[in-house]
Image: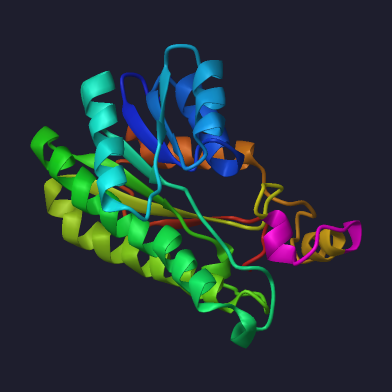
Amino acid sequence: MRLQDKVAVITGAGSGFGEGIARKFVAEGAKVVIADINEEAAERVAGDLAGAAIAVRADVSDGTQVAAMVRAAVDGFGGLDIVVNNAGYTHLNMPLTEVTEADFDRVYAVNVKSVYWSAVHAVPVFRAHGGGVILNIASTAGVRPRPGLTWYNSSKGAVITMTKSMAVELAPDGIRVCALNPVAGDTPMLARFMGEDTEEKRALFRSSIPLGRLSTPRDMGNAAAFLCSDEADMLTGVCLEVDGGRCI
């Protein structure tokens, strides 16, 4: 029960890594807001978590909706201790000059601007309560980029730098900021990373990971629970690679 009595907002929690983090947080005693642009998916996960979760539809690139997401935690559970910026988007794996402007803008709106909006709306709540934790889900793509994903890679590099800068600036307020850098995982975005979902492509991705497998929602939940718990209260600015050795 490492997160007993904590309240967390988790974005993109209707599937994939976000769902894994939400389920682990509840198992560790937290109350969670399941935020997702897919309202049906958010309600499914919240329903499974029986009273420990509420579902909120939120487009994390929209500041008004992020503000409502934070209010839902405060109004529904009486406070806010943790924000996990997990929602993400990628363009298809393709040459960098072929990515449309609309896809480029969407990648940066969902992956980067969302971190800005969550800080704008969550940091004042954290300050009023004496501290909190922000966990950004970045990627090994920001550390060891693969070809064909240039603009996605760069967005995750931005998240890593933002995490470190936020950590230094917010430390005097008792606010810790960390990140997770997962390697490719078996989530709804995997096909977009690979360009096509075939066993040959999956084998190629697995071959680049020394431990020989893709990351899972369980892996992310375990790492997130530690970094967001009081056991990690001396850790800030940490960008932890959950990657089976990919970045070595």
- Closer to us: 196 or 136: 196
Q: Is residue 143 visible?
A: no
In the depicted structure, whether residue 145 falls above or below residue 238: below
Residue range in magenta is 190-200
Q: Main secondary structure of the magenta part?
A: helix
What residue do we see at 49% from left, 22% from top? Answer: 46
Per the image, is 146 magenta?
A: no
Name the spot of residue 94 as percent of width and height, x first. 69, 77
Name the spot of residue 11 as percent of width and height, x first. 43, 42
What residue do we see at 37% from left, 55% from top? Answer: 61
Please state if 32 lies on the left or on the right of 133 as rendered: right
Quadrant (top left, top right, bottom left, bottom right) of the C terminus: bottom right
- Closer to us: 126 or 50: 50
Farthest left residue in view: 128
Per the image, is 199 magenta?
A: yes
- Closer to us: 167 or 205: 205
Farthest bottom residue in view: 97
Name the spot of residue 207 as percent of width and height, x first. 82, 64
In terms of image quadrants, where is residue 91?
A: bottom right
What residue do we see at 31% from left, 27% from top? Answer: 7
Quadrant (top left, top right, bottom left, bottom right) of the N terminus: top left
Please state if 238 lies on the left or on the right of 142 as rendered: left
What residue do we see at 58% from left, 78% from top? Answer: 150
Q: Is residue 138 visible?
A: yes
- Closer to us: 28 or 154: 154
Name the spot of residue 218 as percent of width and height, x first. 62, 36
